[in-house]
Image (cartoon, helix red, strand yellow):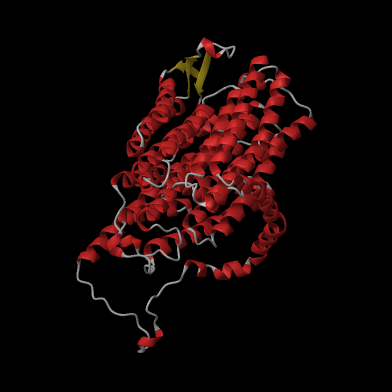
């Protein structure tokens, strides 16, 4: 792998620092505009550098001089973007750019209500923390940036601090995140002590006995599992994601929870090479549990953003199912295909779930509501948002020729033909979960855009969202289509990355399974696109032609049809919820006797800090002490 110097890595750092520290000086709308535009510029650079590193199989490096007066014991800090990091930095750039442009208009709704100065500081700092997390090769730096990502996300989740539900969600997220971080820190610091170095490269030389290896597997799985919201460590996510501003929700779901996937791959698989079979079986089992549980919970939601939050739990399950299944099959060449399909799904999920959160934000922007029972009929007034929501919903449901189909198909087919009975059952369940996904997003589409409008929806007050928001939606919708048709442009570099990491000769399987599949799937996608275009043209022709509208046939009696013919969102899939009621009842009793008592006890403790600012600043002090202690440890070592 060729290593080259690229100073643009430092440019991204400088632009994001400027966005954080210069923007708040301008106050109000100017502060928001400056922060969003600078963050967008940094995101574009991330996209370009990530594509260069990934497509050309390069490692980009840059040295940042550290001022002597800081007395850190080192004179420079290295920024390193290798192909593995590039996959996740590409996601950060894509969602960071569209979320920032979207926020130019969306966040203005908080003028005079929310603290835009705080937002203008925290938002780019959040993106900066993830960028630094992905470009470091130092354990201590990884821990510091991981904690910085956690605390900045906390501020963004609690942005609407006047709402008690937002404060509770942010505090729950913070406590659970710190619990996971504690396990990660213990594991990584133990490794630092064992090898006497904080460099990633030195960690790869370590050897472990069985006891230490299984301890590391447990700690790292739970630690990263909490951040990625794997079941049963997921409960913070359905509360936190809906309460954040919608462009931030896109970043939380599309990017932040994927940082846990990156961390697990980097440490547990690439550097430490922990027992692949044991780790894989654990991850695959947690993954399929998350996929199933997240989907059945999304099915019953009436809050549009909570529906998408539970959907994120389900979709991250697909990712871990693929990674775990691949590790279980190692060193079979199918392992590379399964893991690469999972990482492709990471990219695809970031795009279509980011788009879905943006469409939900557009609905909130125009109607002020997330309640699907109160929405309806928006397709007539918001055609761009409706089209974007339709594309994203079909993509996440795995419908060809969109991007979600390719990654799901590769995950399922690689596990089905593996010959492993456990993975075959998991793949069958994954097919069922995909059907559930189509079900709950059909509910979202029909209730928000197609059903009869609720009494609170007045057409004369509703119009399409402002241009920056519409552009962001259109970009992500276009990517859903492009990556569905030309998926090999991204899949082949990902296959190359994991072939290098796991050192498996996958050429034979790739030739047999994928070379013909590329041609077949691409031809299938093109045919479907032609059919879709033809249907659209036919629909337009029908719209402009004379159409005779007749009333619904009611057997000759007008009294048989109600004035408002539609189901509310609570009435969808009632037969399914009755059939599988045991799952919902189990969750009810778990919350009643375990989770709710613990949450109430915690909130009674927190009630001593009724002023949220006091608690926020208290947290910052603790975090500062923690980071200082880590730096001291690093210098001593």
- What x and y, as percent, mark residue 233? 65, 46
Question: Can see residue 130?
Answer: yes
Instruction: State whether residue 198 is above or below residue 482.
Output: above
Quadrant where the C terminus is found in the figure: top right
Instruction: State whether residue 436 is above or below residue 547.
Output: above
Q: What's the residue at 54%, 29% (across, down)?
A: 133
In this view, the residue in front, 525 or 287, is: 287
The quarter of the picture where residue 105 lies is: top left
- What x and y, as percent, mark residue 487? 43, 40
The quarter of the picture where residue 636 lies is: top right
- What x and y, as percent, mark residue 625? 62, 27
In this view, the residue in front, 191 or 484, is: 191
**In the image as oriented, which residue stretches furthest toward the bottom?**
556
Left or right of residue 176, residue 363 in this image: left
The quarter of the picture where residue 187 lies is: top right
Q: What's the residue at 61%, 23% (across, down)?
A: 628
In this view, the residue in front, 211 or 328, is: 211
Q: What's the residue at 37%, 85% (across, down)?
A: 554
Number of numbered discs visible in the structure rendering:
0
Question: Can see residue 44?
Answer: no
Q: What's the residue at 20%, 65% (across, down)?
A: 544
């Amino acid at each position: 792998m060729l290593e080259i110097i690229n100073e643009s890595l430092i440019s991204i750092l400088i632009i994001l620092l400027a966005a954080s520290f210069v923007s708040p000086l301008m106050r109000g709308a100017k502060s928001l505009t400056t922060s969003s535009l600078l963050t967008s510029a940094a995101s574009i650079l991330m996209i370009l550098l990530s594509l260069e590193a990934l497509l050309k199989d390069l490692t980009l490096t840059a040295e940042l001089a550290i001022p002597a007066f800081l007395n850190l014991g080192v004179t420079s800090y290295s920024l390193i973007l290798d192909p593995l990091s590039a996959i996740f930095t590409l996601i950060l750039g894509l969602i960071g750019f569209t979320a920032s442009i979207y926020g130019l208009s969306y966040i203005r709704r908080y003028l005079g209500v929310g603290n835009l100065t705080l937002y203008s500081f925290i938002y780019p700092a959040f993106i900066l923390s993830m960028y630094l997390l992905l470009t470091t090769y130092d354990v201590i730096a990884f821990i510091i940036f991981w904690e910085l990502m956690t605390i900045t996300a906390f501020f963004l989740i609690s942005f609407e601090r006047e709402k008690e539900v937002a404060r509770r969600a942010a505090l729950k997220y913070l406590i659970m995140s710190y619990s996971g971080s504690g396990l990660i820190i213990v594991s990584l610091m133990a490794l630092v002590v064992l090898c006497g170095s904080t460099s990633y490269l030195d960690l790869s030389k370590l050897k472990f006995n069985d006891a230490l290896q299984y301890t590391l597997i447990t700690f790292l799985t739970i630690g990263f599992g909490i951040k990625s919201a794997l079941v049963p460590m997921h409960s913070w996510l359905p509360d936190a994601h809906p309460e954040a501003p919608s462009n931030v929700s896109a970043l939380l779901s599309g990017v932040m929870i994927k940082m846990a996937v990156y961390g697990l791959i980097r440490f547990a698989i690439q550097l430490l090479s922990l027992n692949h079979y044991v780790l894989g079986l654990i991850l695959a089992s947690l993954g399929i549990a998350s996929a199933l549980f997240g989907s059945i919970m999304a099915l019953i939601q009436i809050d549009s953003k909570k529906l998408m939050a539970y959907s994120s739990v389900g979709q991250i399950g697909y990712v871990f199912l693929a990674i775990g299944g691949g590790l279980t099959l190692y060193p079979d060449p199918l392992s590379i295909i399964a893991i690469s399909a999972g990482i492709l799904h990471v990219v695809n999920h970031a795009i279509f779930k980011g788009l879905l959160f943006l469409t939900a934000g557009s609905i909130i922007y125009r109607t002020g509501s997330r309640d699907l029972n109160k929405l309806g009929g928006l397709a007539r007034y918001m055609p761009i948002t409706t089209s974007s929501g339709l594309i994203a919903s079909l993509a996440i449901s795995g419908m060809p020729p969109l991007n979600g189909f390719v990654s799901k198909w590769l995950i399922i087919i690689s596990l089905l033909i593996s010959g492993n009975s456990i993975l075959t059952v998991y793949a069958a369940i994954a097919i069922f979960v995909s059907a559930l996904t189509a079900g709950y997003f059909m509910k979202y589409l029909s209730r928000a855009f197609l059903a009869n409008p609720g009494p609170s929806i007045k057409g004369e007050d509703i119009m399409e969202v402002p241009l920056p928001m519409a552009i962001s939606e259109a970009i992500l919708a276009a990517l859903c289509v492009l990556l569905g048709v030309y998926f090999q442009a991204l899949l082949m570099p990902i296959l190359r990355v994991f072939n290098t990491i796991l050192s498996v000769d996958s050429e034979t399987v790739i030739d047999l399974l994928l070379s013909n599949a590329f041609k077949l799937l691409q031809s299938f996608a093109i045919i479907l696109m032609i059919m879709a275009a033809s249907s659209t043209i036919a629909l337009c022709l029908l719209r402009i032609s004379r159409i005779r509208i007749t009333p619904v046939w009611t057997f000759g009696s007008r009294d048989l049809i109600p004035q408002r013919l539609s189901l509310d969102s609570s009435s969808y899939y009632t037969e399914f919820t009755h059939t599988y009621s045991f799952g919902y009842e189990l969750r009810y009793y778990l919350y009643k006797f375990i989770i709710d008592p613990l949450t109430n006890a915690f909130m009674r403790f927190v009630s001593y800090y009724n002023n949220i600012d006091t608690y926020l600043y208290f947290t910052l002090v603790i975090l500062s002490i923690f980071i200082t202690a880590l730096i001291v440890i690093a210098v001593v070592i």
